[in-house]
Image: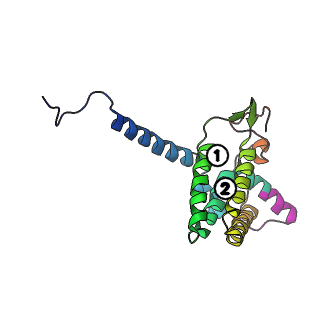
Amino acid sequence: MTNYGTIPTSSSPPTTNLEFISRAKTKIKEGLGTRRPWKLMFNFRSFNLPAGFADAISRVKINIGYFQMNYALVVLLVIFVSLIWHPISLIVFLALMAVWVFLYFLRDEPLVIFGRLISDRVVLVLMAILTVGLLLLTGATLNILISLLVGVVLVVIHAAFRRTDDLFVDEEEAYGFAPAGGSSAAAS
């Protein structure tokens, strides 16, 4: 007797694989959706000229602390677009993006290595160094450095012109002293 046309009652491997893919898609949507809202980042009523150089520096520090994940995505997008005509570099970049996704963007729990709590800022800096270093080994050096410079300039311009009075952030988090997970215990 065949089971053609019946609905299986136990989970079979294909269903398990589909469930895994579905959970991964949901986790990606939740992970990227729960970061700082893009609507808040690009609220045009929150842009004006800084009062002076000190105000601009203060805004940059606070905005980078508050929108650091969004800014990382912007810089990575600029680098990605610049690598479209460099297939080897693009393949290396896409492999590194998988590492970025799991170690930085979608991590729910704090990263602990050898019993030490590693802050999001440390993960961001180390991943950025690793990404740029490995991409420079692929032969698209000038292209990568220019795109990195363009990404950083975009971030600094946005951070300097975006007011910070509508951001609800505590001082520790704004300046990047809070470790991943939000507790102010031992960082890095």
Q: Quadrant of residue 10?
A: top left
On the image, the x and y values in percent for residue 135 come to 67, 61
On the image, the x and y values in percent for residue 120 come to 71, 44
On the image, the x and y values in percent for residue 121 come to 74, 46
- Magenta range: 47-60
Sequence-wise, the earlier of marks 2 and 1 is 2
Q: How is the image coloured?
A: rainbow
Residue 96 showing in the rendered view: yes
Asked if disc 2 and disc 1 are in contact, CB closer than 8 Å, the reply is yes
Residue assigned mark 1: 104
Between residues 147 and 92, which one lies in front from this camera angle? 92
Asked if residue 56 lies in the magenta stretch, the reply is yes
Q: Residue at position x 47%, y 42% from top?
A: 24
Quarter of the picture containing the C terminus is top right
Asked if residue 109 lies in the magenta stretch, the reply is no
Q: Which amino acid does the dot numbered 1 rest on?
A: Tyr
Q: CA distance from mark 2 to mark 1?
A: 10 Å
Judge the density around disc 2: few (<14), some (14-19), many (≥20) Cα neighbours within 10 Å.
some
| Left or right position of 26 against 8 | right
Which residue is most to the right? 54
Numbered marks: total = 2
Residue assigned mark 2: 72
Q: Which amino acid does the dot numbered 2 rest on?
A: Ala
Q: Quadrant of residue 13?
A: top left
| Left or right position of 29 against 80 | left
